[in-house]
Amino acid sequence: MSGMKITDSPWLTEQMARNILSVIQTSDSNKMRIPAPCAIRCQVVSQSLASMSGCDLDIEVGSIRWLPEQDVLVVHDYDWLEMYESHGGMDLDDFFVAYWRLIDGERKVVIMRSPNDYGEYSVFDYVEGDWYPTERVSAGTIEFPPVPTYPGLWPKRLSEAVRDGEIEYLGLPSTRMDPEDSVRRLYNRSDVRAALLNNVDSQTCVGANVNARSLDSDTNRRHRPVQLTTMESCIDTGAQGGCAEDIDAVTTEAHQIVQAIINDPDEAPIDAYLWETRFARILGTPFDPKRIRYDGHMTQIHNFRLRFAEEYMEMVRDFVNNHVAQNLDPRIHELGARYLSRGYDLMTYSRQALVGIQSNNKRRATADDWEAIHTYMLREIDKCGAESDRHDMMLGLLSACHKVPAASTGRVSDQLVMNPALFDPLMAALRYYGIAAHLFINDDGQIERRFTESWELPCTNCDDVGITVNPLEWQSFNARGRICPGCAG
Ligand SMILES: [Zn+2]
């Protein structure tokens, strides 16, 4: 808007790139984030519900249709009932992730909810002509990426396993308790107190149970023949404030699942990523360390992700160093020359202060540390006196940042000036010399930008009022104490 671009600043360019990276990586590297191509998050509803909204679709059993009017996927009522167990007893408002895939040469749509337990997915035929998502990559556009089908890769779906009697659900304690305890009655103070007390436990019991089930799915790759209840019910116990007995049971089941894996007489290999990020901190490694496998799917995906993030940031830094850092408006270096040495001093002070903070305290600089540095810098800039001198100092500082890479990284960074404290003075300086634009709202309510293109030079010694379109001339006029070239001799 001001006539400047994000890519005029090395620091802002890098921060923007980092933001894009947050699709796969947060500051908590244990949080696995994997963007899946040709997949979307949407609701899946039954044909009956679609009809009720006035949308009649032809749907065959086994296929899934995209309903563009509602942006939802629709399945035959029969399939809706069939897939009930495979999606945690979904009702009609649940969101799924749908993947458009090529399986054995056929176009399919795979749906699942998140989180999901072993076998909680369904596969439908894609109907030709229906909408499907595509993904643009550097090599072109991909659609229906193929997925492998080797034996053992696709678990038996949960609803089929339940129907075949392969799983016994013991049931939550509340299902066997006196109905008095669970029947609806007036909510009183002790209910609130109990709910508050339960809250902490209930949140942790969900995480523990979901993590334990994930570890079991990944390690044993089979439906657990005896389960407390479905994963969905365990989650509801926590999320919807189940009774203490249920919360205990869900936590106990989590413990039992993990213990069974630890004590497994067959010593099944355990995925390194899952164990180290979810269990090792509390449990250590209470089994033969040789069981930790580093080639498991989860570990591989995690490593791919880290490597991609590293390579991507390397690419960004190259771009910043070879393009952004070289492309600073040359007028900034010209105008910054006047105060360049003081700009260097200020930059050196700040960088040394940061290094001091980090090495003395063995931590990264905090917001307070930065504020102290910024306050010092602003004070030094204020000391310059006249308005024009303060602007020159800002440009000297910006020029210095671009000329001297940070010693610790060897990279050009203008982080020192691209922060809320110094950004305003910087923009003021850039506007003062016509490098950045002034913004205003015109009579039509539109934002307009206007660059200062000429400067009046009223001499304080004689009556001469010169005019210049050259910001450097404007700078020397001010630096001379506002005296015309004639009077200056
Ligand atoms: Zn004069």
Image (cartoon, rainbow, N blue to C red):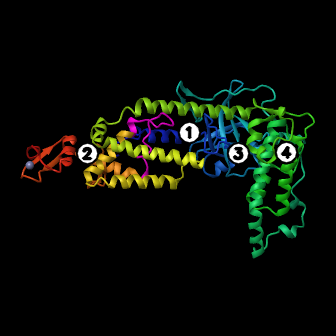
Q: Which residue is mark 1?
A: 21
| Element type where label 2 sits in the image | loop
Which circle's residue, 2 or 1, is located before the other in the chain? 1
Tag 4–tag 1 contact (CB < 8 Å): no
Q: Label 2, label 4: how many angstroms apart (C-alpha)?
A: 67 Å
| Element type where label 1 sits in the image | helix
Image spot of residue 292 (x, y percent) = 80, 34
Q: Label 4, label 3: how many angstroms apart (C-alpha)?
A: 21 Å
- The boundaries of the magenta stretch are 401-420
Image spot of residue 484 (x, y percent) = 11, 46
Q: Residue at x 32, y 47 (%)?
A: 393
Image spot of residue 427 (x, y percent) = 34, 49
Q: Which mark is residue 114?
A: 3
Which circle's residue, 2 or 3, is located before the other in the chain? 3
Ligand 1 closer than 8 Å to label 2 CB: no
Which circle's residue, 2 or 4, is located before the other in the chain? 4
Which circle's residue, 4 or 3, is located before the other in the chain? 3
Where the C terminus falls, by quadrant?
Answer: top left
